[in-house]
Amino acid sequence: MATNPFENDETTYVVLINDEGQYSLWPTFAEIPAGWTVEKAADTRQACLEYINENWTDMRPKSLVEAMGS
């Protein structure tokens, strides 16, 4: 059975962010997709998930927040 690289505690990850302020947990062995930049340097899966939980408090895309004026 194949394992999902996004759920492997033995893999090193980074936290990515896009222009809309959305976050993504990303394994370091995979190429960073266009439109995303590294927000948190390589760390454990748990540390990256904690970073996302602490910093991504509003799930709305940045453009929607701006359009709503809040």
Image (tube, rainbow, N blue to C red):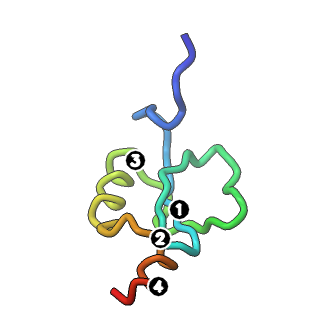
Give SS at disc 1.
strand
Q: Do the residues labelled 2 and 1 touch (CB within 8 Å)?
A: no
At label 2, counting other C-alpha atoms closer than 10 Å, the crowd grade (few under 14, some 14-19, many 20 or more) is few
> The N terminus appears in which quarter of the rendering?
top right
Q: Gap in Å between the C-alphas at discs 2 and 4?
A: 10 Å
What residue sits right under mark 1 in the picture? 16
Distance Cα–Cα, label 1 vs label 4? 24 Å
Q: Name the residue under label 2.
A: 61
Q: Which x, y percent locates residue 55? A: 32, 68
Residues under labels 2 and 1: Cα distance? Answer: 15 Å
Name the residue beneath numbered marker 3.
44
The extreme bottom residue here reads 69
Q: Is mark 2 on a helix, strand or loop?
A: loop
User: Which of marks 4 and 2 precedes in the sequence?
Assistant: 2
Instruction: Give the crowd class for mark 1: few <14, some 14-19, many >=20 residues within 10 Å.
Output: many
Type of residue at label 1?
Leu
Q: How far apart are marks 2 and 3 (CA)?
A: 26 Å
Q: Mark 4 points at which residue?
A: 67
**Residue at the spot 52% in from the left edge and 21% down from the top edge:** 3
Tag 3: amino acid: Thr
Q: Which amino acid does label 2 sit on?
A: Pro
Helix, strand or loop for disc 3: loop
> Residue 24: image x %, image y %?
49, 55
Give the number of the mark in front: 2 or 3: 2
